Amino acid sequence: DAKTTQPPSMDCAEGRAANLPCNHSTISGNEYVYWYRQIHSQGPQYIIHGLKNNETNEMASLIITEDRKSSTLILPHATLRDTAVYYCIVRVSANQGGKLIFGQGTELSVKP
Amino acid sequence: DSGVTQTPKHLITATGQRVTLRCSPRSGDLSVYWYQQSLDQGLQFLIQYYNGEERAKGNILERFSAQQFPDLHSELNLSSLELGDSALYFCASSVSLDALGGTDTQYFGPGTRLTVL
């Protein structure tokens, strides 16, 4: 399973963009990068996923490098409610059942 | 609201007891996943069911078992409970198009907090 590396914590000022990096140097060609977040002890919330191309939805943007060895999740205008632990996950290939392997994630603190 | 429901929200029990956690997937989802989140282990995959059949197994203890019923809801049974089983238990569901080579986003429920005293 491809392993991901994320900084343990980051701070961001409210209203500014939050850029959360993730390294996944052993990712396979058919593995997707998924981002989830967990606010306090709530259930993890899906944010976005991608394979090769950059992706954007109403919550965030995902930038994947051309070699696919790293990615960045961008929250364009962070609010206090975005304070959470953010998990970057490389999705196990389908023939292995598709489980999600969570690392320690990045604890993002959005400050006023 | 993800559309995945879990009951109960909280459960307090004693060592040696048996409990059952229930999960109802999103409408139309065929796959159910169970995860455990404890303070020292983080979020860990336990088991997956797809359309009533076990599909993948993680680090699930022999004292734990699960099943998925014809109406697609799932139950996680935990027996001979120990103090170390205290954790948050999350259920997730997905449509599960894996067989077709598509991506398959998992949506998580709010969890059941189990406290073993």
Image (cartoon, grey):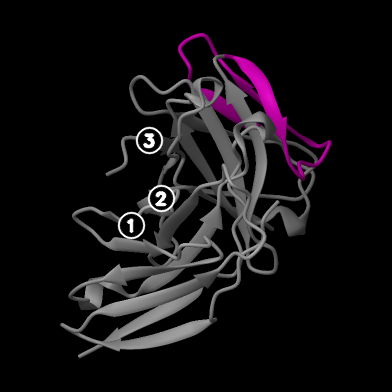
Q: Are marks 1 and 2 in contact (CB under 8 Å)?
A: yes
**How far apart in space, not on screen, are marks 1 and 2 (Cα)?**
7 Å
Q: Is residue B73 magenta?
A: yes
The chain to which mark 1 is attached is A
Q: Quadrant of residue B105?
A: top left
Q: What residue sits right under mark 3 in the picture?
A: B4
Amino acid found under the numbered disc labelled 2: Gly
Residue A92 inside the magenta-drawn segment: no
Magenta region: which residues? B52-76
Per the image, the residue denoted by label 1 is A54
Secondary-structure class at tag 1: loop
- Quote the CA–CA distance across marks 3 and 1: 28 Å
* For residue A16, side relative to residue B41 (left or right): left
Residue type of the residue flagged with mark 3: Val
Q: Residues within 10 Å of mark 2 (few under 14, many from 20)?
A: many
Question: As displayed, is residue B99 above or below residue B9?
Answer: above
Image location (x, y in percent) of residue A67: 53, 62
State whether residue A26 is above or below residue B73: below
Residue B93 vs B15, above or below: the answer is above
Whether residue A88 sits left or right of residue B42 in the image: it is left
The residue that disc 2 covers is A50
**Residue ID at (62%, 55%):** A27
Is the same chain shared between marks 1 and 2? yes
Q: Residues within 10 Å of mark 1 (few under 14, many from 20)?
A: some
Q: Nearer the viewer, residue A87 or A93?
A: A93
Q: As shown in the figure, which amino acid type bears the numbered disc 1?
A: Asn
- What chain does badge 2 belong to? A
Label 3–label 1 contact, CB within 8 A: no
User: Taking B45 as reference, is B57 above or below it?
Assistant: above
Choose between A54 and A74: the one closer to the eye.
A54
Q: Which sits in the foreground, B65 or A29? A: A29
Residue placed farthest to the front in the image? A66
